[in-house]
Image: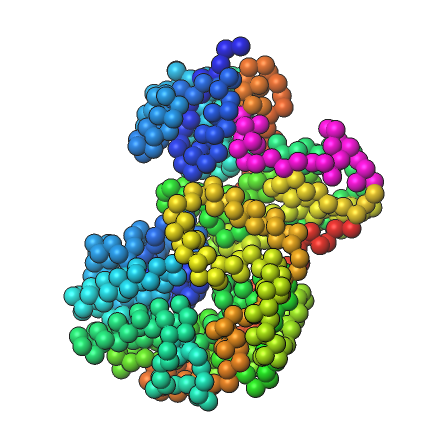
Amino acid sequence: MQERKKILITGGTGFVGSNLIGRMYNDYDISVLVRNHSSYARLSRYKNINVITGSLSDQGALEDSIKSVDCVVHLAYDPSSQKSNLSGINNIIETCLKYDKKLVHMSTISVYEPLSSPTINEKSEYKGNTYAYAKDKKEIEALVTDAISAKSLKAIILQPTIIYGPYSGPWTDRILGQLRTGDVVIPDNDSSVCNAVHIDDVSEATVLAINSESAIGETFLISGPDYISWPEFFNHFAASLKEGAVLRYALKDIKKNQRNPIRLARIILGDPKKAIDWEPMKSILKSLQYKLTPKMKSTIKSVYATYKKYSPRAIYLPNGPLLSLFNSESVVEIKKAKDILGFAPKYSFDSGFKKTEEYIKWAYPLPLEKMYD
Amino acid sequence: MKKIKVGVIGCGAVVELFYLASLKRLKSQIDVSYFVDMNEERAEKFAKKFNCKFTTDYKSISSQVDAAIIATPHHLHHPIGKYFLENGVHVLIEKPISNSTKEVEELISIAKEKSLIASAGNFRRYQDSMLWMKSFTKEMPLGKLMSFIAREGGKYNWPVTTNSFWDKKSAGGGVLIDTGAHTIDQVAMLCGAPISLEYNDNAIDNIETDCDVKFIYSDDVSGDVQLSRTIALGAGLLLKYEKGSLYLDLIGKRILSENDLVNQLKYNGHTIADLKVQDYVKLMERQLRHWSDAIQNNSSSYVSAEDVLPSIQIIETCYTQNNKA
């Protein structure tokens, strides 16, 4: 019998990590690196996961956990500190090189943003720095790419597209949350292309990468077998939730609204979290986050929840990078992943969404406050 | 009146966030004498705040306190509670009071035999809205209960201080026994115990993060409870009666109804419109006050181990059903 592979997953408690662990649990020995006990909730369904408490900057913990595994899957990303993202990936690279271990690094389609050419493949050009997430992920990916070419690091880079499905923060939960509390504005463009991929297919691609020898040193775009327009993508969620509306505005009107102070005030009053998009607010919050006690955090949450209950219905306008994405007509090619990794995405958008609807039904039932008479 | 000497057993998050502040407010009634924790540093840190003693050995303090607050990992609630009761010390045990019916029954029986107070830390029962609902369900002004839906959930963010919380043996289970110790208790208190249950959860080979419980009362009366540690479900209960329905915040003050009769009803001096919200520290303070009143004055207005027994029975039945499946 073949020995079970030992895998260390960073970011194992997150959206992609939890799904990947569900896919791998029966066939692999899994270790996860967690920063605190609270974040472990989603993995508590499993008994036999080796939990290592520590951070990526903890070189000792990292060495101990990497030297005993066959492969590291690096999913962790901290939006609040690029410094720790960079030191984390450097530590992982150094340790993988030291112990001759394989690394599967999860990057993103965002590194190609803004998407403007008719097709996007692994040879497409990386554009200028568009926004924090894309810029961060590009920098992190560059360190892996450099280590592959300069030091023969045994790494594979995956670049998934729009990952939707249960627990997807940006591409399922955020959309549903917005539709529940307001209306979502998108550009009126039926030729736009949403390169969506179901989370289960991303996990499958990751497993293929873990086991592939021929893919070492390569980068792969991972997307679904088909694509739809962005209006279609959003309409699926609105139809399933039966709440909120997807408003199709002309591109110029969205841009005008983004600059109109009265509109902006209404948007922020409708959803104060929008204020977080404002860079100075981001740095204030970043500096505060380690100073807030759990009690203070819970008070803020409760005040926010109460406010949301009584606040006007929000209108959610896409910010600059999202607007560009929702208006993009670029089609992502996955030929390389098919040919070298053997990637064969299982879910068309229709079948993947059908699966996601089971989650929507469970996680977004009609609020009880709307059901009394 | 003589103050009650209290030992606090377990110095985890619930003690740090809520008990410390509420105990400070009750200085005239309660004299905190000891903090006990396996982690001596934490016990010492809390003891300094009260200028009292600390130890890692709970057994060593039983002769020096009148009463003990037990806020340890779940599986230790019963053995530590039992030890104190057997040694003549009143107890207030955090929820879930225990992981099994048998253990709760044993605590009840020892407390009875020794004439001691065994109280359950189901502090939500002290909310004004729950007290209002208690009177409402006694009177049944909207007729017979036909169905209900209870939902409670949020992305888990409790600042657990040890990994024991994720271990089936020490935690006793997942969201059902943790959050459910409140939700199921509130539902059982307001709707009664069902004749049968249907249970589903998502545990693989450890504990569940999400679950559904169906309460069946008869062929045409049933209720659904949905609990989650991963999904924001809020915390509410919708009750449908023959003549109308109402919504209750499980944590908070809101009771909502379109029914004129319900809106005019006054219990304990309150209509549903003038109910006020009590924060957690205030509720803990209320819980501690009722408990110490019971110890000092034989008052019976505290939440007893017997009160929460039906919810522990329901939780146990759910887990047993799952094991059989």
Residue placed most toward the observer, B80 or B52 = B52
Q: Quadrant of residue B50?
A: top left
List x then y, in percent, for residue A285. Answer: 43, 53
- The magenta stretch spans residue B284: yes
Above or below: residue A203 compared with residue B275: below
List x then y, in percent, for residue B134. Answer: 70, 34
Horizontal side of B219 relative to A267 (left or right) equals right
The range drawn in magenta is B261-288
- The magenta stretch spans residue A41: no
Horizontal side of A36 relative to B89 (left or right) equals left
Residue A205 visible from this viewpoint: no
Q: Quadrant of residue A29?
A: bottom left
x 37%, y 80%: residue: A127
Residue A278 visible from this viewpoint: yes
Q: Quick one: which residue is furthest to the bottom in this view?
A: A118
x 66%, y 46%: residue: B237
x 30%, y 31%: residue: B40
Figure colour scheme:
rainbow
Above or below: residue A275 compared with residue A218: above
Q: How many marks?
A: 0
Residue placed most toward the observer, B138 or A74 = A74
x 57%, y 40%: residue: B182
List x then y, in percent, for residue A117. Answer: 44, 88
Horizontal side of B318 relative to B196 (left or right) equals left
Above or below: residue B80 compared with residue B158: above
Horizontal side of B140 relative to B168 (left or right) equals right
List x then y, in percent, for residue B231. Answer: 54, 56
Quadrant including the N terminus of chain A: bottom left
